[in-house]
Amino acid sequence: MVETARLEITALGQRGEGIARHKDQVIYVPFTLANETITATIEGQRGTLVAIEKSSPDRIDPFCPHFGTCGGCQLQHMDTNAYKAFKRERLVHALARAGVDAEVGETLLAHGKGRRRATLHATGKAAGFTQLRSHAIADLDHCPILVPGLKDAPEIARQLAKRAGPCDVGFTDTPMGLDVSVKAKRVQSETGLAEIANRYGLARLAINGEVLLNFRTPYVPMGPAQVPLPVGSFLQATWEAEEVLAALVLEAVGKAKAVADLFCGMGPFALRLAQHHKVYAADSDRDAITALQSATRTTSGIKAITAERRDLFRDPLTQYELDRFDCVVIDPPRAGAKAQAEALAQSKVSRVISVSCDPQSFARDAAILISGGFTMGQVTPVDQFAHSAHVEALACFDR
């Protein structure tokens, strides 16, 4: 049953939605701000904004015509100071729920010129991110939160989908041009794909993980190295975020003699650390480790990097393996590093640097390290997903 009601927004939830109460039930209303009075339609716990009766002083006009329909951004209507405070509070609340008393610093914005990678859903008629609360595609002509190099991404995705059928198209902007990876349940036809790649100057085009066309092998700079980019590989969303996080990691590592970089990916930290330290690096992604090993061999002026493919969820470094390191960097995916944090808590490691893209798993792992005798330093929030509810975190733990 759908009803219309007047609501008072009291706070924002972790997804950036406004929170209100109606008939003893919590209601979530996107595109609202704390201390606003609104009219909304209500269905279950979902509210849909109809009108704003009293707006927040933190409200600004969104800059994208697709905002409110496209699900790619949630917070374009929030001014910068309130936006930074929201990101910080996400970490404060997550740590408090985990029983961790921590100092959380001001949010560092690392948007740069925009996101260098994105995955768009595409058919022959539409391409974009999914619409809010829907699997339907928000058809875009361009996306202003992406780097200028991705300005043609929606049209390229539409053109590819006309040939390949409905698909997800991953784009990465590299110095060699666009690296494009298509995932489709069933590729209807590869005819004409080369013409599209030539028309838009793609560096590489892959279909379901297999390279179809490779005009210029994509490389990405990471500190002193040029790293060959595996198909569909992970990179920080913005170049600036990688630089900011790496600088914070290098500063925290300091003069440590033996360093481990766990969940290392292609080595954005390891390759920079190797300018001054010998590094052990591990990750479960075979292609990422192969790329790191290749970059290590071709980069002069760095110390040894021992890179190993290892599933750190199922096979974390044991406390005895960890004891040879005086500093360990962990940068796990959203699930966090529970098993590895437990081993670190039992080890003799004196410093751990935790980098995370999920406040809840970050807080859980922090509590584990603290239970092992570590003291947590200031937490630094880093924002790279502009106008979204996502936030990265970094903190140093010592004992």
Image (tube, rainbow, N blue to C red):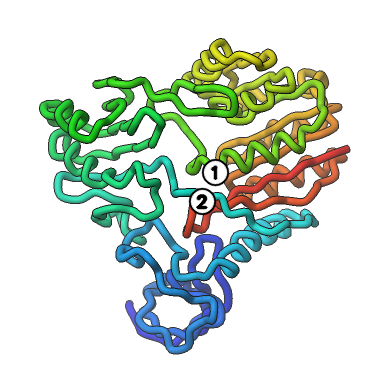
Mark found first going from the N terminus, 1 or 2: 2
Residue 306 falls in image quadrant: top right
Which residue matches tag 1? 240
Image position of 58 (left or right of 250): left
Choose between 294 and 31: the one closer to the eye. 294
Position of residue 383 relative to residue 250, above or below, is below
Q: Secondary structure at mark 1?
A: helix
Q: Residue at x 37, y 28 (%)?
A: 176
Residue 147: image location, x then y, percent: 40, 46
The residue positioned 50% from the left and 16% from the top of the image is 290
| Quadrant in the picture for the N terminus | bottom left
> Is the C-beta separation of discs 1 and 2 under 8 Å?
yes
Residue that sits furthest to the top in the current view: 297
- Classify residue 89 by image quadrant: bottom right
Q: Which residue is mark 2?
A: 111
Quadrant where the C terminus sits is top right
| Vertical order, 150 against 26 (above or below) | above
Q: Is residue 92 above or below residue 47?
A: above
Q: Callout 2: helix, strand or loop?
A: loop
Q: Amino acid at mark 2?
A: His
- Residue 381 position within the rendered picture, expressed as x and y whole percent measured from the top left: 65, 52
Q: Nearer the viewer, residue 361 or 250?
A: 250
136 displayed left or right of 373: left
Residue 340 x/y as whole percent? 70, 31
Disc 2 crowd, CA 10 A, few/some/many (<14, 14-19, 20+): many
Is residue 175 rendered to the left or right of residue 65?
Answer: right
